[in-house]
Amino acid sequence: MCMKKLELYIHIPFCIKKCNYCDFLSAPAGEQEQTEYVKSLQKRIRSYGALMKAYHVVSIFVGGGTPSLLKAEQTELIFEALYDSFQVDEDAEVTTEMNPGTVTKEKLLMYKKLGINRLSIGLQSANDEELRRLGRIHTREEFLSTYRMARKTGFGNINIDLMSAIPGQTLESYEQSLSFAAELEPEHISAYSLIIEEGTPFYERYGGGSHAEELPSEDTERKMYARTKEILETYGYHRYEISNYAKNGFECLHNLGYWNRTEYIGIGRGAASFVNHRRWTEGSEPVVLTRQEEIEEFMFLGLRKMEGVSRVGFCKTFSEPMEVFYRDVIAKLKMQKLLAESEDRLYLTDRGIDVSNYVMSEFLF
C-alpha cells in the first residue's frame, strides 16, 4: 500500500502576556491549566492513531501561543504521544516556535532529544522601542541570548520572524532589523507586514483611522516590502513565498505543504485540519469541500509560492485543463502584467505580488 503524506500541527495556546497586535487563540494560563491541557492534548493525539495508518508524517509544527512556555517534561509527554500514535518519517521536519525569555538550555536539550530539528524564534524587531510598542516580553539582547544558546546547543535550522509597518517604525529602522537578523545567518527568515486585527489593543488604538499618524504611510510600507527582498538577497536568501525567505535547501517544508495542499491534522484548541477533502477546526464538524472550492484553493494557495502553480498538476488533480475554468482571468491578469508563465508554470510577477490579494480574488468563482 502506498502511504500518503501527512503534516501535523500541535497548538499550544499559552503565553506570558498577549501582544498588542495578536488575535491568535492564546492567553496567559496558570500551571494547573497548562497541565490539564497537556493531558487533554495527549489523549487527543492518541485518538488519531488508529485512523491514520494509511499516512506517514513528513512534518510536525508546534505553534502557539508560546510552545516554549511549557516545561521540558510537558513537551516530552506531547512528543511521546505523537511518536506512539503516528508513523513519523526519520527525516521529518520538526519545528517548534519559541519566544525569547521562555527558553532554557534544559528545554533546548530536550527538544533535540525529542527529534525537534528546526526552531522558529519570534524577534519581530531589533529595535527595543518597537518591541515595547508591540507588547513583546523581550529585548533585542534577550533575543540574541536565546539565538546564541540555540546555536550552541547544536540547532542548524533556525527561522527568525520579523514584522514591518509597526507603529513608529521608519524605513531606516526596519532596514536595520533586516540587516541585524540576516547577519546572524539564520537559515530562514519570515517577514510579515503588521495587520491591525479586530479585538486587539492595536485595533482599539488604530482601527478606524484613529492615531493613524503613528503608523508608517502606505508609501513607506511599500518601500519596506521592496527593501525586504533587496536586502535579504544580498545576504544570500531567496524568496520562495510571498512572506518567506530561505537559504538554499532550507525552505520550510511544513509551510510548503499548506500551499501545496498536503493533508494535515491540527490538534489542540482551535487547530485546523484538512484530510480527505474535508476541513474542520478542533471541536467542530468536518465540512466537505466542493470541487469548486478545491479548485479555488489550488490556485490562490499555490500562487503564494514564487514558482506558482503547475498546469500539469492542475490537470492531474481535476482532470481538466486550467483554462476550462480560468482562461479569461489568466488572459486579463497577464495583460495587466500581474501574472507571467514559463513552460508549465503560472506565477505572480513582482507587480502581481504587490497586489496579491486582488490577484487571488480573481480566482474565486
Image (cartoon, grey):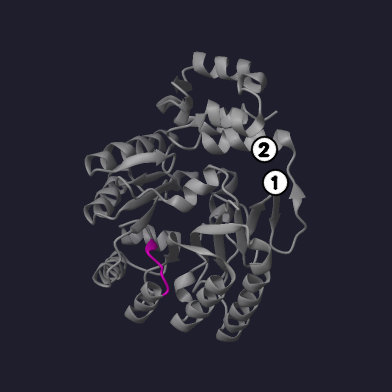
> Is 154 in the magenta?
no
Report the magenta residues as a range: 114-120
**What's the amino acid at mark 2?**
Glu
Quarter placement of the C terminus: top right
Which picture quadrant has residue 285?
A: bottom right
**As drawn, which residue projects farthest toward the front?**
1
Query: Is residue 176 shown to the viewer in this render?
Result: yes
* Mark seen at residue 294: 2
Q: Is residue 57 left or right of residue 293?
A: left
Residue at disc 1, secondary structure = loop
Q: Residue under circle 1?
A: 277
289 lies above or below 329: below
**What's the amino acid at mark 1?**
His
Disc nearer the start of the sequence (1/2): 1
* Mark seen at residue 183: none
Q: Position of residue 329 (x, y in %)?
A: 60, 19
Q: Is residue 254 left or right of residue 332?
A: left
Which picture quadrant has residue 119?
A: bottom left
Is mark 1 in CB contact (under 8 Å) with mark 2?
yes
- Tell me the distance, in whole angstroms, between the alpha carbons under discs 1 and 2: 8 Å
Mark 1 crowd level (few <14, some 14–19, many ≥20, 10 Å Cα) = some
Q: Position of residue 310 (x, y in %)?
A: 51, 29
Residue at disc 2, secondary structure = helix
Which residue sits at x=57%, y=80%? Answer: 34
170 lies above or below 96: above
Q: Position of residue 224 (x, y in %)?
A: 36, 39
In the foreground, 195 or 67 = 67
